Amino acid sequence: MHVSDQISALSCGSCCTKLVKLGVAFGQNRVLDDVNLHVHCGQFTAVIGPNGAGKTTLLKAILGEVPHTGHVHFIDSAGQRPDRPLLGYVPQKLEFDATAPVSVRDIFAGAAGRRPVWLGIGSSDRVRAKEVLDTVQAGHLLDRKLGQLSGGELQRVLLAMAITPVPNLLLLDEPVSGVDLSGIELFYKMVSQLRRDYHLSIILVSHDLATVAQFADRIVFLNRTVIADGTPREVLSNQTVRQAFALPPELALSFPEIRPEHKDGRGCISCNLEKRP
Amino acid sequence: MNLWYWLTGLLPFDWLSFAFMKQALLAVILVSYLFGLLGSQVINQQMAYFSDAIGHAALTGIAIGAIMGLADPTWAMVIFSGLLALAISWLRRISLTSTDTVIGLFMAFAVALGIVILSRGGGFARYSGYLVGDILSITPTEISNLLIMILAVTILWILYFNQLMLISLNPSLAKSRGIKVWLLEAVFSLVVAVVVTVSIKWVGLLVINSMLILPAAAARNISGNTRQYVWWSIAISLASGISGLIASYYLSTATGATIVLISMGIFVITLGLKKLAWRT
């Protein structure tokens, strides 16, 4: 069975993620306060905001890495609430020792399988890793060391890892900072493709307004709490947002004419039926 | 043990004619395997300084043992190092101070406290054996304890190696895959602390960290993936361990330090190999 078949058989697209009154404080410093967000399945949401606005902290709170107040609910397409939702996460540029003897195959097998990597990787694991890497045009990188990859290649490998298995929610934290222009383009093309194929919910934290305007279907402007929330056109014409990013009034960002709207609403019926506050 | 005596008796080496050397050879093989396996992960987790601190902190453990009047302070050492390891990994988690500083503080404190207690009444010389270590003094009981430790670490490595590898790359990434990052880090620190502390008696606290770190550092120079890395680390550790034991027998030198010199040599060679590989 092909990986893509396998994946679509496993997941019809998970439903939604709800953040309710989410708050995070480091000591006296309230980094996030009363954040309410509702991310639908198949939706590509970009979170933008000034430095120190709590964007990365928001992702870490969703990951459960920093303690938070309020709630994070995950509801899958069957209307169930998985106790441990599957989260895919692509970090910012990995800070690691470039000479580290870790190959692409190692991190793949290490993340996906239980068999310890130091005792060798089975050929079936190898084939599976190759198939998933091929979906992000990274199959040829299988035996390279992580330190030998370019920034864009590494991020595509991390993206492939994040969608194995297909997550309920994919979190991207400035995934292409320090990647060259063509690498950025390719990365987001891959993300959009995966979103369509697997009906993924995606939250992207980014500084890059041009890319965000081009690829996301929704933008959330965050500065400790949600300041603006809407389509790229709405949010990027908001005065507060334009001031924060020092966008000159005459500058018009280009938006794609046809946006892949999420129409079927299949997964989201269950969260609309949610009677919780 | 008898099987080992019989096996080594088959080997035509002068230095193996003594029972204590047969035991020492077995001990070196076991310790080297364990250190090779552990060291590769210590470097991955960037904990070389941590393990060094744990080694030095054993002085306080010895001192506590002495105060309590224990003939063999091993348990006091293990408990103290274990607590210290947990304290450091806890502080690493909650404090914004850099890890280096936290570890440095603890190490300075533990070494000073140990020396102050042990040197009361001018008796420090009695404990200087711990500084250099003596692998020849190992007893069959200690060897079987070592075997149990190896078994435990190997099982742990089979179950949790992949997760530790992901943590070393990026803790958030590991967390996103449901890995209990903090728990595993704490367990790993504890394992390093126990193994280092127990081995000090045989290797000596001055050189123990080099024995842990050098084979893995050398293996890093010549490995293209994780499997090669771990097995090269074990192989280099074994090679320098066994040759160091033999050399120290003929040169009448301290075994631990001799082993470290040999692994340093191997490290330099692998560094040369790496440079060569880059040039071509």
Image: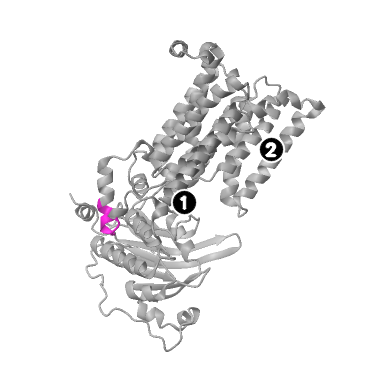
Q: Residue furthest right?
A: B121
Residue A77 numbered tag: none
**Circle 1: residue type:** Pro
The quarter of the picture where residue B205 lies is top right
**Residue B193 visible:** no
Residue lying at 39% horizontally and 39% vertically, measured from the top left: B228
Residue B38 is one of the magenta-drawn residues: no
Q: Residue beneath label 1, please?
A: B171
**Circle 2: residue type:** Ala
Horizontal and vertical percent position of residue B235: 44, 32
Horizontal and vertical percent position of residue B223: 41, 42
Kindly indicate whether the residue at mark 1 contacts the one at mark 2 (C-beta within 8 angstroms). no
Q: Which residues are magenta?
A: A131-138
User: Which one is nearer the viewer's eye here, A21 or A240?
Assistant: A240
> Callout 2 environment at 10 Å: few (<14), some (14 to 19), or many (20+)?
many
Q: Secondary structure at mark 1?
A: helix
User: Which one is nearer the viewer's eye here, A238 or A255?
Assistant: A255
Q: Is residue B207 left or right of residue A108?
A: right
User: Which callout, 2 or 1, points at the residue further toward the start of the chain?
Assistant: 2
Horizontal and vertical percent position of residue A104: 35, 50
Q: Secondary structure at mark 2?
A: helix
The quarter of the picture where residue A28 lies is bottom right
Q: Residue beneath label 2, please?
A: B110
Q: Are marks 2 and 1 on the same chain?
A: yes
Q: Main secondary structure of the magenta part?
A: helix
